[in-house]
Amino acid sequence: MGPPTEAVIIYESAIPADALERALPNVVLMLAYRPDGTTGYGAGLIVSHDGLVITNLHVVSGATSLAAMLYDKNRVSYTPMDGGLTRYLFENERALVRARLVRGDPTNDLALVKVDADTSKIQLLELSNRPVRPGEPVLALGHPQETVWSFTAGVVSAIHHGAIQHDAAVNRGNSGGPLLSARGEVIGINTSRVLGDADGLAFARPIDLVQDLIQQVARGPRTLDLSAPDKAVLSCMRAEELASPDIAHCFDWEARWVLLQNSIDEQVRMGVLTPEEAAAARRRLDELGGKEGWIEDRRRYLVGFVRGERARNNPERPPPANDGLHLEAGVSGATGDEKVADTWDPRLLERNGLKLDVSNPRAIQEVLRMGIRVEEVKYVRDDLAWVLVNGRNTDGTPYRFSECWVKKGDRWLQHSPPSPEEVKLLPPELAPPIDDYDSWKQVMVQGLIRPTSGAASTLRCREGTRC
């Protein structure tokens, strides 16, 4: 019996020279100039004829400016022992072009960058639409250890949730580069490797996550499924986990405006506010543009919070290039100076089992990544339902809480916080909510009365997504 021919066929087709020749012009060298004077580098993949490039967010994050270089087969490249990337950049400095961050996805470590270069004549690589299977041969393209526009080969080891595991060598400089199939199709973007003794373990984000990010830029955010309470809960929590601007469409802002108006009157009746303070709060709302302006302000802050940034102008704007995504504890705002964590009663979190730093949006996302499920939906009216949510903290311990959802037209929207009347309708067998109307109203109204002068942002709100 002769040698197995299938293995020969696989490895002959694993590294087709013509496919590699077509692929290399699609790969760019990304440079990130840091505040400390150092320069980070990585790879990127051209995905449009108008200069859009996909890469890893960690490649471009924290940079004061970005630059890129397109492929030119006529340039001489060098290994580290002959001068490496430093020499290559010195000799080809004129080929550098400016680049800017368009949008980032901190959860999946992906970023879209726009390069100031003509990419109209590049034959773009096909983004694969077929399932990837373990055992498939793959190529990892990039600039590993300063060896620009080079590749390594391997096979797919396993398919995980949101990740392709493979054994092609991935080193510094591969991040953001494409993972290709033997057909020359892009199946993923190389993101990381396991450090230490675990050789042959590398991971790529599958191309469908990349396509989703591209479509968000081209067509706006993806559509939420708000057709039923349980679907709305899962869809909106997924949007929060991904730091998507879709999160702003999950709430009944009109109802929240009514709650705010009622809370001002209520606090005057209770003697918590003087008539003069109530008038000051209403003047501030007028300055914001009344109901529509206040709602836009709340949406803007919410999107900014889940992205780990200070709220600014447009909810659809790209997130900042930052690594840690730690919201400053005392970020000030034009309509309030309270801190996120201060608007929560920690006893409510503890009562429901949540172990969470609510002032840190990344911490919230890490908890969501532990998984959530809808345990039960209780319709207390045709247009109002309480949804019991079950999840796990990062240490594996469980938590449970309920959310109030109302039907508006053909959509289910969250009431957060629920009104006192809605809380009375909560079935006793369900876990209590972690939203608290009393805490919310005090923070919101006090923020209107005592704004921080000269700041450009907005009110702090509870857990960011519950403001």
Image: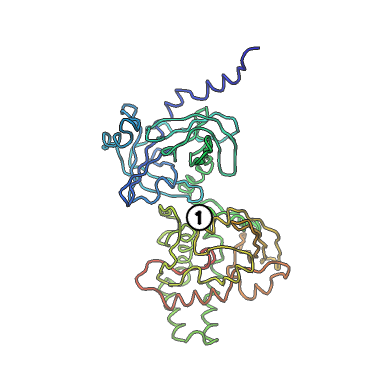
Quadrant in the rendering for residue 20: top left
Measuring 33% from the left and 29% from the top, which residue is drawn there? 77
Quadrant in the rendering for residue 345: bottom right
Q: Which residue of the protein is positioned furthest toward the front in this rendering?
A: 197
Q: Which residue of the protein is positioned furthest toward the top in this rendering?
A: 1
Tell me which amino acid carries mark 1. Ala
Residue 29 in the image: state x and y as whole percent.
37, 38
Q: Give 147 or 418, whichever is nearer the viewer.
A: 147
Measuring 50% from the left and 55% from the top, which residue is drawn there? 243
Judge from the rendering whether residue 287 lies leftward or rightward of residue 366; answer left or right.
Answer: left
Judge from the rendering whether residue 77 lies leftward or rightward of residue 458; answer left or right.
Answer: left
Q: Is residue 91 above or below residue 331?
A: above
Residue 3 in the image: state x and y as whole percent.
61, 15
Residue 379 in the image: state x and y as whole percent.
71, 65
At label 1, counting other C-alpha atoms closer than 10 Å, the crowd grade (few under 14, some 14-19, many 20 or more) is: many
Question: Circle 1 — which element?
Answer: loop
In which quadrant is the N terminus drawn? top right
Q: Give 177 or 115, whichever is nearer the viewer.
A: 177
Q: Which residue is mark 1?
A: 243
Q: Is residue 59 above or below residue 442?
A: above
